[in-house]
Amino acid sequence: MLFRSGVLKHSEKSLEKLRKGEEVTEQDGWYFVATPTFRTSSKKYEYLNSVQAINHYKVMRLGAEGGYVRADVYLVK
């Protein structure tokens, strides 16, 4: 299971760019940080039960085809 909370802020500029299907970055007044936590019974991924992840999203583009996000991901033990 994945549980996530975080902070998402947009400017008028970033919202307009998203609506047009354009790439959005922090320079557009967009800020997105998420803090997912994991719960798994899998032995392979058991280490995830004891870490806190922090995702700092840098770039995003929406779209059914060609949409993407780029983020720095940190694991805090």
Image: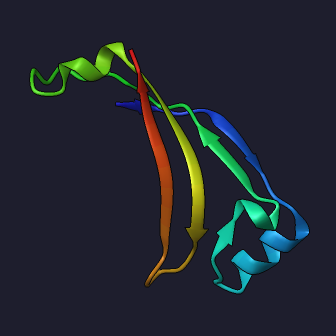
Quadrant in the picture for the C terminus: top left
Q: Position of residue 42 (x, y in %)?
A: 13, 24
Residue at the image position 55 percent from the left and 31 percent from the top? 35
Residue at the image position 23 percent from the left and 19 percent from the top? 47
Residue 34 vs 10, above or below: the answer is above
Number of dots carrying numbers = 0
Residue at the image position 43 percent from the left and 84 percent from the top? 65
- Between 40 and 45, which is closer to the camera in this rendering? 45
Position of 25 compared to 65: left or right?
right
Residue 67 vs 25, above or below: the answer is below
Q: Quadrant of residue 13?
A: bottom right
- Between 37 and 72, which is closer to the camera in this rendering? 72
Quadrant in the picture for the N terminus: top left
Residue 55 vs 64, above or below: the answer is above
Question: Residue furthest toward the right?
Answer: 12
- Between 65 and 30, which is closer to the camera in this rendering? 30
Q: Position of residue 2 (x, y in %)?
A: 40, 33
